[in-house]
């Protein structure tokens, strides 16, 4: 029932990926031709879509300044729908010019381009608008939709992907965008995706049971891009902020994409004045199931970052009392 | 409409001017006209040059891509928004009109299509964008 990457074997995309890379000199002045070049030698819908998605993720950069300017204005006009609309139309024209000339954009530009190229290749693809929740957004109050991604129909089934977040991340210090393709956002597992993607339209959750409320979404742990490469499910805890007592057992449960070794799992624990990398007190691995247990031996307020193979996966906070 | 009425007036003129002998010719013409009332068969085999003009709400658009679906054959509009498709087209062919920021439109060539006057609409999406970050979250602390 779950619509994700494991419906397709990874090896299937080698040809699609190499076609996308071979066309990296192409620009956006002729989208029908680009769509044709990317897809005409591929047989399946999944491969055709892969080539389009891979091309966009590797050739379109994310523009931090455009992002800042837009969020500033959107916040300023958030109670004035007319001004907001005028701003959006004006900004949209500028944005598409920039995308065309400089191949740089913000999320909706990525999602738009994936959708356009896909529909030119006769694939059914939609832009999904909603909320994206990352460590640097004001995570407690997301009052305006701030993110766009795609839904794609392959062999009659809908899947999710996020070309913006797959393309790379800004350098934490300079904020300059750096291409760093993350394959985890391609046909992502909907229940993992749901932890930091909240669609405005309910149908784009792509699952029906236990759909998060907006409150659940705002309270969820912070998930980083690398989680998508390493995890299949994030089962527990459901909340980011937890209270606990000294020596009390705290638990974490995940389903991983591959079987891990105990030494792959580390915590970085920050108590406000310094941070320490430690091994959790107990790690249990059974096939793809990962269970972590830990206890705090001192009172305090801790940021707990989970790392798998030195990749930052998720963050939680613990208030430890007597 | 014009192409339908014109031959008829000509036929009437011809009829009024020439004699009985030519009646047979008229009759032939009439029957020809009847064939022409079911033009599908005739014109589908007729490949023709398609011209057109593309604009948005306010102005004509330069650089709109027009491609025959499933091929790489195509052209782009000039500064007046005009185009002449480089390949002769037949009924049932589909042209894709694509311009970044506008919704792609498909136009099917009909029996009577020779000129396409197309209005593209700006994609209606709201532009938003959150960045992913590899930066670890840091709690705000008072003390």
Image: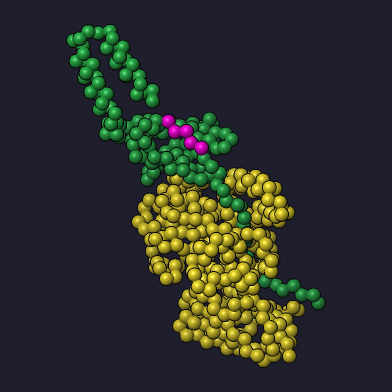
Q: Is residue A221 left or right of residue B8?
A: right
In the image, residue A38 sits, relative to residue A211, either above or below, namely above
Q: Residue at the location (57% across, 51% down)?
A: B125
A72 drawn magenta: no
Chain A tint in image: yellow
Region of the chain picked out in magenta, as a range: B115-119
Q: Residue at the location (44% across, 45% down)?
A: A33
Q: Is residue A205 left or right of residue B67?
A: right
Residue B122 visible at all: yes
Of residues A63 and B11, the one nearer the viewer is B11
Residue A191 location (% of width, % of height): 52, 71
Q: Residue at the location (37% across, 31% down)?
A: B112
Magenta span main SS: strand
Of residues A247 and A146, the one nearer the viewer is A146
Chain appearing in green on the rendered image = B
B117 drawn magenta: yes
Of residues A31 and A111, the one nearer the viewer is A111
């Amino acid at each position: 029932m779950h619509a994700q990457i494991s419906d397709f074997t990874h090896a299937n995309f080698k040809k699609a990926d190499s076609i996308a890379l071979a066309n990296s000199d192409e620009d956006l002045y002729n989208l029908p031709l680009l769509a044709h070049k990317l897809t005409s030698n591929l047989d399946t819908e999944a491969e055709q879509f892969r080539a389009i998605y891979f091309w966009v993720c590797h050739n379109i950069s994310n523009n931090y300044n455009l992002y800042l300017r837009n969020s500033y204005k959107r916040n300023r006009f958030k109670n004035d729908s007319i001004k907001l609309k005028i701003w959006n139309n004006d900004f949209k024209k500028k944005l598409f010019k920039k995308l065309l000339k400089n191949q740089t954009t913000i999320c909706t530009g990525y999602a738009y381009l994936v959708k356009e190229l896909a529909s030119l290749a006769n694939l059914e693809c939609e832009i999904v608008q909603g909320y994206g929740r990352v460590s640097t957004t004001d995570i407690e109050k997301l009052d305006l939709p701030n993110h766009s991604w795609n839904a794609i129909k392959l062999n009659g089934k809908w899947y999710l992907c996020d070309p913006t977040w797959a393309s790379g991340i800004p350098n934490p210090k300079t904020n300059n965008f750096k291409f760093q393709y993350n394959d985890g956002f391609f046909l992502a597992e909907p229940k993992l995706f749901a932890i930091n993607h909240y669609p405005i339209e309910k149908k784009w959750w792509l699952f029906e049971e236990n759909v998060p409320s907006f409150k659940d979404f705002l309270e969820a742990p912070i998930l980083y891009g690398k989680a998508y490469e390493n995890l299949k499910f994030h089962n527990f805890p459901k909340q980011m902020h937890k209270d606990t007592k000294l020596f009390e057992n705290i638990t974490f449960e995940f389903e991983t994409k591959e079987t891990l070794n105990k030494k792959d799992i580390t915590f970085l624990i920050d108590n406000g004045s310094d941070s320490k990398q430690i091994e959790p007190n107990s790690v249990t691995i059974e096939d793809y199931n990962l269970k972590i247990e830990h206890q705090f031996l001192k009172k305090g307020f801790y940021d707990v970052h989970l790392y798998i193979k030195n990749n930052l996966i998720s963050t939680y906070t613990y208030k430890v009392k007597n | 409409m014009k192409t339908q009425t014109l031959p008829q007036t000509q036929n009437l003129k011809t009829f009024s001017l020439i004699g009985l002998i030519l009646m047979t010719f008229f009759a032939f013409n009439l029957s020809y006209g009847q064939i022409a009332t079911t033009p599908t068969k005739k014109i589908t085999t007729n490949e023709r040059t398609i011209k057109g003009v593309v604009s948005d709400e306010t102005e004509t658009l330069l650089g709109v891509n027009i491609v025959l679906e499933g091929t790489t054959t195509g052209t782009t509009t000039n500064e007046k928004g005009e185009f002449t498709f480089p390949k002769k087209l037949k009924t049932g062919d589909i042209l894709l009109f694509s311009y970044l920021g506008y919704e792609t439109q498909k136009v099917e060539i009909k029996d009577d299509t020779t000129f396409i006057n197309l209005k593209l609409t700006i994609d209606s999406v709201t532009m938003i964008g959150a960045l992913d970050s590899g930066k670890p979250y840091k709690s705000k602390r008072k003390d």
